[in-house]
Amino acid sequence: MSEPVTTSRNAMSRSILAIAAPSMLTNVATALFGLADMWVIGRLGQATAQGAVEVGAKLLMTLLIVFNFLRSGTVALTAQAAGRGDEGAEAATLTRSLAVALVIGALLLLAWPVLVQLGLEMLSARGQVRALARTYVDIRYPGAVPWLLNAVLVGWLIGRRRVRAVLAVEVGANLFHIALDVTLVLGLHLGVAGVAFATLSSETAKLLALIVVVSREGPARRALALIRERATWRAGEVVALLRLNRDLSAAPCC
């Protein structure tokens, strides 16, 4: 094998690793949100409180994980545009994805009472566990909107290979979350409500941090102007985001 080919492959491997390693660490950091909650609430030694947090978190994540296509679809469309060097398409992808996230968020807020009631029934929550789980969910539920927007912003940054910036935000949000958990639950003794407030606050702080990072990217500065352009809202362009989710869902697992 010639030396230029070997050098090229090594460079490609390093490039892939530079993207993949921070991305994997980002997924690990995201998972720490739930672990921190369960550790802190477990320190109280109250089985009902721990059960309520587990039920509430499961309900919300079951509801939100359906919309994870906002991240994966935004990654794909942004990466394609970045590969072509088309900053206009990158900006348009950001605009459309955020709009879709806001529409979904508005619908979730409208369906709040029905979805929470149905979710608690499906998870067979009863008695004190159900009451505490309802408290937890009602506090965290508005955080669905930041969660959806975060999925888009994270996906857009990853599509632009800004994975290290995403990792930095995730780590910062986790540290903030853990500090709030300890303060509100163990310090102020707010129990289940404290865990919920900590998660809502850290998700919102994460959104603000991502907005700051994204606003420094060149294509993002064009995103607001594209809201008024008819081409941004062509049906085919909006459907492309949803179609990617369909294609990923239909792909064979092995």
Image (cartoon, grey):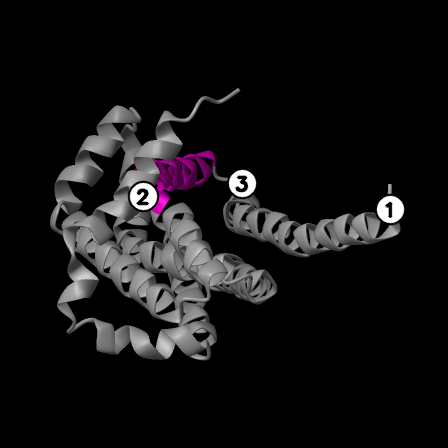
The mark found on residue 45 in the picture is: 3
Residue 155, visible in the rendered structure: no
Q: Nearer the viewer, residue 184 or 57?
A: 57
Q: Residues within 10 Å of mark 1 (few under 14, many from 20)?
A: few
Q: Is 247 on the left or on the right of 170, as rendered?
A: left
State the count of labels. 3
- Residue occupying the point 53% across, 58% down: 186
- The answer to whether 69 is drawn above or below residue 12 in the figure is above
Q: Local crowd at mark 2 within 10 Å, few (<14), some, or many (≥20)?
A: some
Instruction: Report, in whole angstroms, how far the alpha carbon at label 3 lies from the one at label 1.
Output: 64 Å
Q: Which mark is residue 67?
A: 2
In the rendered image, residue 92, in percent from the top left (x then y), is placed at 29, 65
Q: What type of secondary structure mainly makes up the magenta span?
A: helix
Distance of mark 1 from mark 2, alpha carbons?
Answer: 46 Å
Query: Sequence order check: which comes first, mark 1 or mark 2?
Result: 1
Label 3, secondary structure: give it. Answer: loop
> Distance between the Cα atoms at labels 2 and 3?
34 Å
Q: Nearer the viewer, mark 3 or mark 1?
A: 1
* Amino acid at pointer 2: Phe
Task: Name the residue type under label 1.
Answer: Ser
